[in-house]
Amino acid sequence: MLKNLPLIILLTGILFTACSKEELVQEKITTQSGNLLFSLPDGWVKEQPASSMRLAQYKLPGDGGKDAELALFYFPGTGGGVEDNLTRWYGQFRGTDGNSPAANAERNELKADGMRITTIYFTGTYLRSSSMMMGGDIEELPDYALLGAIIEGGGAPWFFKATGPQPTIDKWRDSFSGMLKTAKITKDQ
């Protein structure tokens, strides 16, 4: 047994290296206007979209089952501009002081592959509607956060919107930013 110990150590090291290497999964979301490509962060769980309005949906796991949800939308010709959508997102929350969360929101702009990306992060009480169009019963979820991005390119904006308990959203902020930096829009030839 001791005679084979160096071989066992070598094979264990090779197996550990192969299993611990983080592989980036390339996502490709296709529309009539083009394709959005991005690297799916390790730990995000791809799910079946909850509605036909969503192109993709991901679970962002949290501690103790306090998961967040990230949805990707694309509305050619009907999605509205950046400011319209930020205003809509602010309206889905009540700030911690009872006012709009817009006053305390963290808003940034970055560029990726020549595209302008507006990011937003804010916290408060999420006013989750039982209807996708904000018309049904409202469930108030305190200590929630919204992490979003609007990518301008490829015909119409692409919308990433994550909502969930603030600690869970905070846990995934760096991977969300990293994902945005990998975004590209392509056209099939």
Image: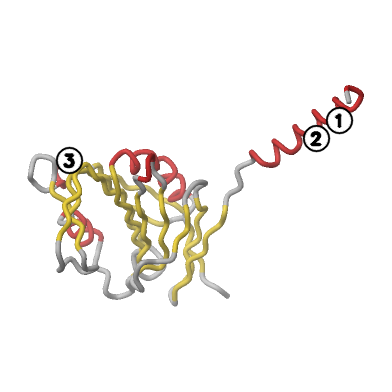
Give the x, y percent position of residue 143. 21, 41
In the rendered image, the quadrant that contains the C terminus is bottom right
Q: Position of residue 135 (x, y in %)?
A: 15, 68
- Answer above or below: position of 90 versus 156: above
User: Where does the N terminus fall, quadrant-wise?
Assistant: top right
Q: Which residue is mark 2?
A: 11
What residue do we see at 34% from left, 60% from top? Answer: 159
Query: Which mark's residue is nearer the viewer, 3 or 2?
Result: 2
- CA gap, disc 3 to disc 2? 53 Å
Q: Amino acid at mark 3?
A: Asn
Query: Is label 1 in contact with label 2 (beta carbons under 8 Å)?
Result: yes
| Quarter of the image where one finds residue 104 | top left
Q: Which residue is mark 1?
A: 7
Q: Residue furthest top?
A: 2
User: Given the image, on which type of amino acid does mark 2 rest?
Assistant: Leu
Find numbered disc 3 in the image and state the secondary structure of the residue it sits on.
helix
Q: Few, some or many C-alpha atoms within 10 Å of disc 3 (few <14, some 14-19, many ≥20)?
A: some
The earlier-in-sequence mark between 3 and 2 is 2
Return the residue found at the far left: 98
Disc 1 marks a residue whose amino acid type is Leu
Label pair 1/3, CB-CB below 8 angstroms: no
Residue 173 in view here: no
